[in-house]
Amino acid sequence: MLRRILAVTMERRTYICVAYVLLRLPLFFGFLAIGAFLFLAIGTFLFRARPLTLWTPLLIVTAAFACWGVVVFERALARRWYGLQLAPLAPERPPHRSLAWQAADLITNPVTWKSVAYTIVEALVGFPFALLVLAGLALGVLGTVTLAGTGVLGALFALLGTPPVDPFLSLRSLAGAILCFGILLITLYVARWVTPLQLMFVRAMLGISQTELALKAAQAQVAAEHARAEVADRSRRDLVLNVSHELRNPLATIRAHVETLRDSENVQQSEADRQRYLEVLNRETDRLSGLVDELLTLASADTGRLELEMAMVDASAVATEVHDAMAPLALRERHIRLICRPEGAVSVRADRRRLAQVLMNLVRNAITHTPEGGLVAIEVATVDSEIVEVAVSDTGLGIEPNEMDKIFERFYRSDESRSRATGGFGLGLAISREMVTAMGGSIRVDSSSGQGSRFVVTLARA
């Protein structure tokens, strides 16, 4: 029984509770002083003892900051010492709000006024209680030590007989020591019992309610879903407009050449003209087929159904294959030299066919935007034990800063006339990003106007 009673003196949590109670003393000494000055300032103004001076608003602001400091201090203690899960002081707000908006949010937030009430209650109740605990500790520790020491000395003097002492001094001293030790135990138990109540009070007053938190979270989720729906709807509208725009030119060309061939009975046409018309029809049909394939690829990526055959792939071998396929065309058609700088056998986790398609898109795009006589390079480099980079760089005109965030958008062209002349639809970079992302990698671009561009594909090393 005695061991259970004395166990409170051996537990670390007891002294954490005592420290939690006593830390209010230095905090509220300053706050009470500010509150007293504020009361005097407002009181003298209300009763017209003297006119309002500059000190009154300064004291009001100082008291507000002091109240805020008490609240932040209490929340930090409850979290750090007791692991208390506290709701935020306010729901998330949009960034870059004006001062007037922030002030309105502060005034309309119920937690603001609950924090003021909390501070007042703590000043009226917590501060006196901390003083009582401090007095109990002082009396318990000092009284126990002093009286116990006096009792022991009295007993020694009584045994020695010199100098003569009161024979009941030792008994009274020991009884007083036991009483003081009892006061110490009671103080420790009271601190242990009151601290959970204070933590409950902190939870209730210094945070928004769980209902409001859940409501705000639901509202935020609804807003996010609404924003996503708007983006999806806008994307669908843009897709329809862009596809209609892209289909118009090849369909018009096909229609014109078909009508010309059908009028061959009325208009004399040579066999060479007929072959030229058929070649145009074949080229435009291929363009339409390519557009359909690209749109199907993007649709599969959007629905998460992009088919991948993930395996260990030699990135250097894929880069070499792309170089061997594109180098003759780049030299013959644009007088551009395409070089490849592989780093030996470097295995990555990827889909070989999709990785080759990504590099083809990047190389073709680099060749298109590099002036004749320029240089395009494919590089494979190991960054560390987990990452491999495959880069395609060129000596072209580079990308303007205002276009850096747009080049991966669907149907975006930095040079409208040149892209149409080369048959592009503005989908190559968008498809490349979707494929790289599906393979667990990322793609970025480093470019400066007039300095060329460098597209870097980052993949996990296998």
Image (cartoon, rainbow, N blue to C red):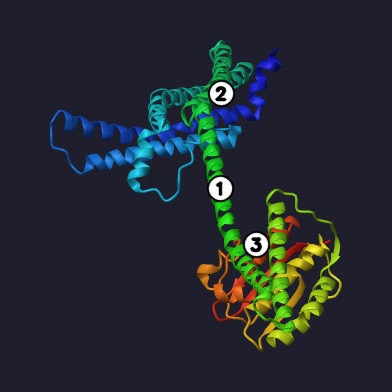
Crowd band around label 1 with a 10 angstrom C-alpha radius: few (<14), some (14–19), many (20+): few
User: Residue 268: horizontal and vertical position, in percent?
Assistant: 67, 81
> Residue 186 location in percent, x, y?
56, 17
Residue 74 against residue 308 in the figure, above or below: above
Q: CA distance from mark 1 to mark 2?
A: 52 Å
At 81% from the left and 64% from the top, the residue drawn is 353
Q: Check residue 196 in the rendering and tell me which mark sits there, or answer none.
A: 2
Q: At which x and y percent is residue 45?
A: 17, 33
Please tell me the numbered disc located at residue 312. none
On screen, residue 81 versus residue 66, left or right, reads right
| Residue 217, quarter of picture | top right
Q: Residues within 10 Å of mark 2 (few under 14, many from 20)?
A: few
Horizontally, is 203 left or right of 251 in the view? left
Report if residue 437 is visible in the image.
no
Q: Which is more N-terminal, label 2 or label 3? A: 2
Rendered location of residue 101, percent (x, y): 35, 43
Upstream in sequence: badge 1 or badge 2: 2
Which residue type carries mark 2? Answer: Pro
Three-letter code for the amino acid on which mark 3 is drawn: Ala
Quarter containing the C terminus: bottom right
Residue at the spot of label 3: 430
Please name which of the two marks, 1 or 2, marks the residue nearer to the observer: 1
Element at badge 3?
A: helix
Label 3 crowd bin: few (<14), some (14–19), many (20+), radius 10 Å? some
Residue bearing mark 1? 233
What's the amino acid at mark 1? Asp
Contact? badges 1 and 3 (CB < 8 Å):
no
| C-alpha span from label 1 to label 3 | 18 Å
* CB within 8 Å, label 1 to label 2: no
Quadrant of the rendered structure where residue 336 is?
Answer: bottom right
Residue appearing at x 53%, y 24% in the figure? 200
Q: Mark 1 against mark 3, which lies toward the viewer? A: 1
